[in-house]
Image (spheres, rainbow, N blue to C red):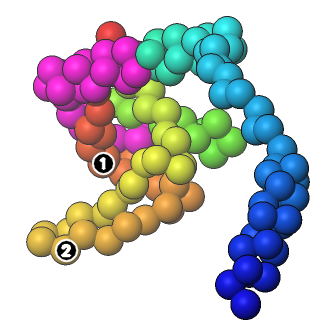
Amino acid sequence: MTLIIILALILLLPFTVLAQTASPSATVLEPSPTASEEQKEIDTLKEKIATKVEELRKGNDRAIGGSIKTKDATKKILKIVDDKEEEFEIKIDVDLTKLYQISGTVSKEITFDSLKKDLYVISLSKKPA
């Protein structure tokens, strides 16, 4: 009985070795030139963002208050006049700008369309660079 098992193993052993195939050799991938170009663009963008954040943190805020002289609904621009008769132009980005009506301690969000001539407004913004 053991002789049959040993004989079977000896006969089957060469077949398992013949059935194996060689695996391909490992290759090292070199970084493509497009990857390095993309990295340079990413680094440039990071520098620009860092510069902008630094500018915003410098605290160059300003507030302008005055009455609405004209309102351009298509361009979303307000022209206001302060108490010194200086005119200012305020460009409003409807996606980013929040408008509030403040009465006492209550504030209510309003739309650009609800602003009217001679209404007193205060604009908070960054000073231009």
Closer to the camera in the image, 98 or 11: 11
- Residue 111 position (above or below residue 70): below
Q: What range of the chain is rendered magenta?
A: 46-69
In the image, what residue occupies the spot 68% across and 84% down? 2
Please provide percent x and percent y for residue 110: 43, 65
- Residue 2 position (above or below residue 22): below
In the image, what residue occupies the spot 83% across and 44% down? 21
In the image, what residue occupies the spot 31% across and 16% down? 51
Badge 1 marks a residue whose secondary structure is strand
Closer to the camera in the image, 109 or 66: 109
Closer to the camera in the image, 79 or 84: 79
In the image, which disc is placed on residue 106? Answer: 2
Q: How many badges with numbers are in the image? A: 2
Please provide percent x and percent y for residue 59: 14, 25
91 relative to 66 in the view: left or right: right
Callout 2, which amino acid? Val
Badge 2 marks a residue whose secondary structure is strand
107 relative to 43 in the view: left or right: left
Callout 1, which amino acid? Tyr
**Residue ID for mark 1:** 120
Residue 12 in view in this figure: yes
Distance of label 2 from label 1 (alpha carbons): 17 Å
Please provide percent x and percent y for residue 17: 80, 52
Label 1 packing within 10 angstroms: few (<14), some (14-19), many (20+): some
Q: Quadrant of the C terminus?
A: top left
Between disc 2 and disc 1, whose residue precedes? 2
Q: Is residue 81 magenta?
A: no
- Residue 71 position (above or below residue 81): below
- Res. 37 image quadrant: top right
**Callout in the foreground (2, 1):** 2
